[in-house]
């Protein structure tokens, strides 16, 4: 059973571990931390915009209806994590490692996954327009009902599983990566 978190005792700090806490409605925006460990925690309706959390481990956690716009999680580890209905646009997960992670109904527009290990991650009903996947590992990552228009590093999707309904938006990025020019016969 988790207990309620409060900022006086459970604010993000360097080299601290938090376990089995319920972060609901808290404002954690703008925090800068290194080597934070969060396990078996729930984040709901939290503001985590512009957080810089390098080398952070997030395990067995859920993040629901939280705002993470502009946050940065370089070299982070996410294990058994579910992000649902979160706003994670303009964020960065460079060099992060994801294991058994699900992004569901999330706004991931222009999020940077460069050099991230996203093998077997599930993206369900997410807006990934303009997201960057350069040099990411995406073997067996699954994209279902996602907006993929304008993603970068599209060649890193080798081995990913993409729902047939999502191919329309992906086709333009694939064509551009291959140097194919698309014209409209009408114009």
Image (cartoon, helix red, strand yellow):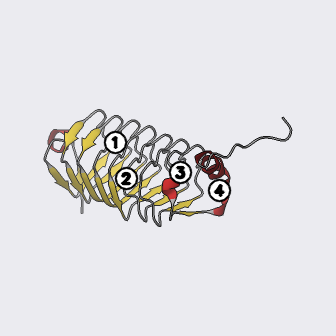
The mark that comes first in sequence, 2 or 1, is 1
Pointers 3 and 2 in contact (C-beta within 8 Å):
no
| Secondary structure category for the residue under label 2 | loop
Instruction: Give the image quarter of residue 46.
Output: top left
In the image: residue 61, left or right of residue 125: left
Query: What residue sits right under mark 2 in the picture?
Result: 116
The mark that comes first in sequence, 3 or 2, is 2
Q: How far, Cα to Cα, is label 4 from label 3? A: 12 Å
| Secondary structure category for the residue under label 1 | loop
Residue 77 x %, y %: 28, 55
Pointers 4 and 1 in contact (C-beta within 8 Å):
no
Q: How far, Cα to Cα, is label 3 from label 2? A: 14 Å
In the image: residue 118, left or right of residue 9: right
Nearest to the observer: residue 172 or residue 42: 172
Q: How far, Cα to Cα, is label 4 from label 2? A: 22 Å
Residue 114 x %, y %: 40, 47
Q: How far, Cα to Cα, is label 4 from label 1? A: 37 Å
Residue 101 x %, y %: 39, 61
Q: Residues within 10 Å of mark 2 (few under 14, many from 20)?
A: many
Query: What residue sits right under mark 4 in the picture?
Result: 167
Q: How far, Cα to Cα, is label 3 from label 1? A: 36 Å
Point 24% across, 63% down: residue: 1
| Secondary structure category for the residue under label 3 | helix
Residue 25: mark in rendering: 1
| Secondary structure category for the residue under label 4 | helix
Mark 4 or 1: the one toward you: 4
The mark that comes first in sequence, 4 or 1, is 1
Query: What residue sits right under mark 3 in the picture?
Result: 154
Q: Residues within 10 Å of mark 4 (few under 14, many from 20)?
A: some
Pointers 4 and 3 in contact (C-beta within 8 Å):
no
Mark 2 or 1: the one toward you: 2
């Amino acid at each position: 059973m988790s207990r309620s978190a409060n900022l006086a005792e459970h604010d993000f700090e360097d080299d601290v571990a938090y376990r089995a806490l319920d972060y609901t409605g808290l404002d954690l925006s703008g925090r800068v931390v290194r080597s934070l460990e969060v396990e078996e925690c729930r984040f709901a309706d939290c503001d985590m915009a512009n957080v810089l959390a390098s080398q952070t481990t997030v395990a067995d956690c859920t993040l629901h209806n939280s705002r993470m716009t502009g946050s940065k999680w370089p070299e982070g580890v996410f294990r058994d994590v579910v992000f649902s209905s979160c706003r994670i646009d303009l964020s960065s997960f460079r060099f992060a490692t994801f294991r058994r992670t699900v992004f569901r109904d999330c706004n991931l527009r222009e999020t940077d996954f460069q050099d991230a290990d996203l093998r077997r991650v599930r993206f369900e009903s997410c807006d990934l327009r303009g997201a960057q996947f350069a040099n990411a590992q995406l073997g067996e990552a699954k994209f279902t009902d996602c907006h993929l228009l304008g993603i970068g590093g599209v060649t890193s999707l080798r081995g990913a599983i993409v729902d047939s309904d999502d191919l329309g938006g992906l086709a333009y990025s694939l064509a551009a990566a291959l140097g194919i020019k698309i014209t409209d016969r009408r114009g």
